[in-house]
């Protein structure tokens, strides 16, 4: 066999070896050893160089070098193809290297705020209730004293799944689900996602979160409601926060109010967050309308209650000084890492 035939032969044998090798570095290294080590097959061919015809030597040397490069490159490629998968097989594993950092992550600002609200209300004896995000017109509107064609429906642009099924526009649907399933007294908060068909902007998003509150018992008064919400505001925003209640309208409460807290961006000096009013609106509330009690079969002569609903994004934005609501939904890691 001429040296050229031997080179071809070895190249073919190597191809078969490398193709049949196991996916681990030990097996590839043994092939490297077989062909490329000092006593390996390729070295054996080099040692024959002295005995071949001088005129063929340059050509033979070139082919041998090519074979060597080919084997080296193929071995490296093969190693790369499963790199990292079988480190434990590698004689090069260095067990003394420091480990990779563990990506710990952090809680989303919405989760942080929700947890805090839950914790404040649970200390006041409220338990947490959850209800459906896809619900019927009845639970989202009708039973809450918002009949079809009522102008109040325009307050909330609704995503309709069908004529009768909606993405809930507020967490108030939980009031009805809870009262239908439990006899009074009731003391719950109900956090969750709500949906509105609104243009996305710095201030509004088609998806956001609310926490609903509902307390039903005998002799519940507006003073109870104000007491609980004032306590909540001081716990959440700090003891120095000021609150005010403005008369408002919601179909499911009578009387109804909105609660504002003093702007803590500017300490009421006036800034563009509070639109120079010194106050930020955080929730709607009121005494449960007798019509709502009737729709769940509670006797309004016996039972009374209050309800409230607050927007979580707004609270998170105020708490953390976030000026664009979209940041809360985009999942930008540079933003989220700050919490
Ligand atoms: N559901 C109202 C909204 O989404 C907020 C609200 C107002 C809830 C008054 C209540 C309430 O429970 O009593 O705008």
Image: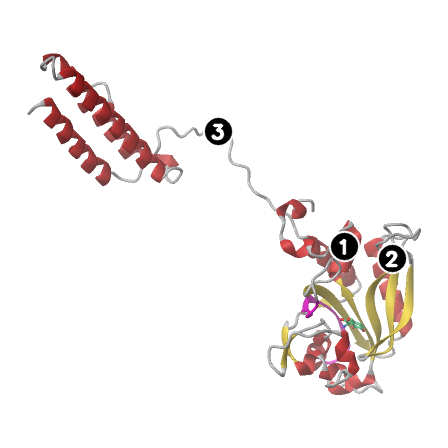
**Sequence-first tag of 3 and 1:** 3
Give percent across and percent down for residue 300. 82, 86
Q: Is 299 in front, or is 150?
A: 150
Give percent across and percent down for residue 99. 51, 34
**Sequence-first tag of 2 and 1:** 2
Quarter-of-image position of residue 111? bottom right
Q: Which residue is mark 2?
A: 275
Between the residue at mark 3 and the residue at mark 1, the CA separation in whole angstroms equals 43 Å
Say if mark 3 contacts mark 1, CB within 8 Å: no
Left or right of 100 in this view: 202: right
Instruction: Please provide the residue range marked out in magenta.
Output: 183-198
Q: Is 196 in front, or is 85?
A: 196
* Residue at x 12%, y 17% (from the top left corner): 56
Say if mark 2 contacts mark 1, CB within 8 Å: no
Magenta-span inclusion, residue 126 = no
| SS type, badge 3 | loop
Q: Which mark is residue 317?
A: 1
Q: Is residue 10 visible?
A: yes
**Front of the two marks 2 and 1:** 2
Q: Which residue is mark 3?
A: 97
- Please rate how many residues cluster around mark 3, counting C-alpha atoms within 10 Å: few if below 14, some from 14 to 19, many from 20: few
């Amino acid at each position: 066999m001429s040296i050229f035939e031997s080179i071809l032969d070895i190249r073919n044998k190597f191809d078969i070896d490398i193709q049949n090798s196991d996916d681990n570095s030990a097996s590839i290294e043994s092939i490297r050893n077989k062909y490329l080590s000092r006593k390996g097959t390729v070295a054996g061919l080099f040692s024959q160089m002295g005995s071949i015809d001088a005129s063929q030597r340059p050509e033979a040397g070139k082919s041998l070098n090519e074979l060597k490069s080919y084997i080296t490159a193929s071995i490296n490629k093969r190693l790369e193809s499963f790199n990292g998968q079988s480190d434990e097989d590698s004689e090069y594993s260095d067990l003394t290297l420091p480990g990779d950092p563990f990506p710990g992550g952090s809680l989303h600002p919405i989760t942080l705020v929700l947890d805090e609200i839950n914790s404040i209300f649970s200390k006041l004896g409220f338990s947490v209730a959850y209800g459906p995000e896809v619900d019927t017109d009845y639970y989202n509107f009708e039973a809450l004293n918002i009949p079809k064609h009522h102008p109040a429906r325009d307050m909330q642009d609704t995503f309709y799944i069908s004529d009768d099924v909606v993405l809930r526009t507020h967490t108030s649907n939980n009031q009805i689900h809870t009262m239908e399933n439990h006899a009074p007294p009731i003391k719950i908060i109900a956090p969750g996602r709500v949906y509105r068909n609104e243009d996305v902007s710095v201030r509004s998003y088609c998806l956001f979160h609310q926490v609903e509150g509902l307390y039903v018992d005998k002799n519940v008064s507006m003073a109870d409601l104000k007491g609980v919400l004032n306590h909540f505001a001081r716990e959440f925003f700090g003891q120095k926060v000021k609150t005010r209640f403005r008369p408002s309208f919601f179909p499911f409460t009578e009387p109804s109010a909105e609660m504002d807290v003093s702007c803590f961006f500017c300490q009421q000096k006036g800034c563009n967050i509070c639109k120079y009013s010194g106050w930020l609106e955080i929730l709607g509330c009121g005494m449960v309308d007798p019509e709502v009690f009737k729709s769940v079969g509670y006797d309004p002569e016996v039972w009374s209650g209050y309800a409230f609903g607050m927007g979580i994004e707004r609270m998170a934005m105020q708490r953390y000084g976030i000026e664009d609501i979209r940041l809360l939904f985009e999942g930008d890691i540079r933003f989220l890492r700050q919490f």
